[in-house]
Image (cartoon, coloured by chain):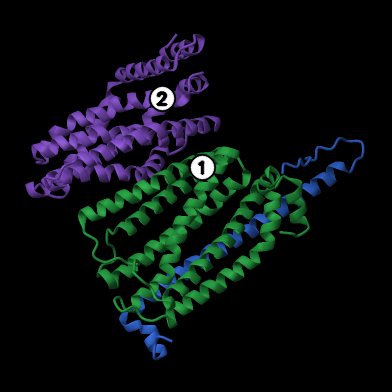
Chain colours: A blue, B purple, C green
Amino acid sequence: MAFDSFSAFIAMEGHGPYVWACYAVFFVLMAVLMAGSLRSRKAMVESCRRGYEFQADKSKVASAPASSASFARVNVSQD
Amino acid sequence: MNAETRLAAQLASSRVGALAAMKGVFARDMKVAFRQRQDLLNPLLFFIMVVTLFPLGVSPEVSFLSQAGAGILWVAALLSVLLSLDHLFRHDFDDGTLEQLVLQPQPLFLLILAKTTAHWMLTGLPLVILAPVLGVMVHLDGNSIAVLCLTLLIGTPVLSLIGAIGAALTLGLRSAGVLLSLLIIPLYIPVLIFGTGTVAAAAEGASVGAYLALMGAFLVLALTLAPFAAAAALKISLSNG
Amino acid sequence: MWQIFHKLGSPKWFFGISTRFMPWLLAGGVLLLMAGVVWGLAFAPKDYLQGNSYRIIFIHVPTAFMAQSVYIMMASAALVTLVWRMKLADVFVKAVAPVGLVLTFLALFTGSVWGKPTWGTWWIWDARLTSMLILLFLYGGVIALDRAINDEKSAARAVAVLVVVGVVNIPIIKYSVDWWNTLHQPATFKLTEKPSMPAEMWVPLLLSVLGLYLIFGWLACVRMQTEILSREQRTRWVKEFVLKGRV
């Protein structure tokens, strides 16, 4: 430990505000970036799922009468 | 038959050499520009006005102006080149000439080089010619004015060449003008630094040969690389539809 | 060889493998960063010249280092986009550019706050800070161009051209800013260049650099996956992944 007490650690011989401001901004921004990235990924998964469910409902309705032609989208793999 | 389609037809129909094609593009750009003289004057007026702002906004003191003059002139020249870049491809893009140029058998980067040369002759060169007058107005001494003009002469073609990349990238986009500035200004910084630095060195009595050679190296680098990048960017922007 | 190359470019393959690695990247990154930061803040000895303010180094250097390496990585990926039109490469560029912007901002912010106790002023036109500022502009330009072009494919290729042009310019910018700096003010005090740093200082620094590197890897994976999901949502494999909850 480079400091004698906890209060000395916080004060850092007068340089505390600078050091702690830097670390605070760093951790807050990184946390926002990480949480934001995770959230937009989750939102994207959710919107995909909703899209597929909507599609499934539609094709169920469309294919119910056996005689009529179905216009459900055909998924073409592109990978 | 208007000038645009005639040019395209000329280039495509016969087996025109690359040099002849460049000449054709260059001559056409000059002709079109001289038909709209106001467009030629605007960057120059802008240049003069920006320089005027500094004595009014900061200080008309001789000591300040003679020290900051070279920087003021360089920044003003940089901004007015930036302002004129939007016109480099815009007109040809709107009337379809650009698509014709891309389809020509001659390499596109040579045609872009010709267009950029025309652009420099119409904006950069007049700035260089105008610079001594403004140099006197901001109290630069004779030696500094001479060096300043030399740096502008070497530097403004670099500005046009780098600017061509940005103009090609932002072609056909909304608010292309502001975006163009955002993309290009960081790339202009080395030219600005060496342009003004050379004048500062001259004012201190140092020899400027090495600095001018370095700026010449920038020019050679920009001449060899920028047309390729601009050609690639142009093809992407045109395929954007 | 070409098969591996092809596989590397397949979004599906990437999705599978990155999902497996992500928890390790995150855990390792947070652990290393925390170790480096705590060591640096509480246990590393005080700098004899700058006192305790030097402890900012343990986040300033990692962010500055990452800000620059992210741009180099983006440029490599952009080159791959232009030459081989690999899908994953332009996904990478797009996903990572905002991360680079944030890291550059953090490097600037910490550098400037560090400047206050050392130079007595918040901002100094020091060569390093100025280069960082220009790097911030470059990142801003990349993001602005990407946002401005609606078509995904041409956005990716246009951004790739811009990034490559930028990376050719970075050494020139760095060199000219260094020259400009010596012209205007002879360097009096350097922030990070010390002839020899004791191990109690550089080991935590190394730890936090590594930690931030891993966290960046995790961020890149998460953001690339988001981008891939958005681009490939019409494909069968994404549908399978989503409906079976494998995402």
Residue in the image at 34% along x and 78% along y: C47
Residue toward you, B100 or C148: B100
Chain of the residue under the numbered disc 2 shown in the image: B
Residue occupying the far right of the picture: A66
The x and y percentages for residue C33 are 52, 72
Disc 2 target residue: B91
C78 up-or-down from C33: above or below: above
Chain of the residue under the numbered disc 1 shown in the image: C
The x and y percentages for residue A15 are 33, 78
Disc 1 target residue: C160
In the visual, does C198 lie left or right of C99? left
Q: CA distance from mark 1 to mark 2?
A: 25 Å
Residue in the image at 74% along x and 59% along y: C246
Q: Dot 2: what SS?
A: helix
C137 up-or-down from C212: above or below: above
| Quadrant of the drawing holding the N terminus of chain C | top right
C130 up-or-down from C149: above or below: below
Residue occupying the far bottom of the picture: A5
| Location of residue C195 by image quarter | bottom left
Disc 2 marks a residue whose amino acid type is His
The x and y percentages for residue B202 are 14, 43
Q: How many marks?
A: 2
Around disc 2, counting alpha carbons within 10 Å, would you say few (fewer than 14), some (14 to 19), or many (20 or more)? few
Q: Is residue A46 shown to the viewer in this render?
A: no
In the visual, does C13 lie left or right of C109? right
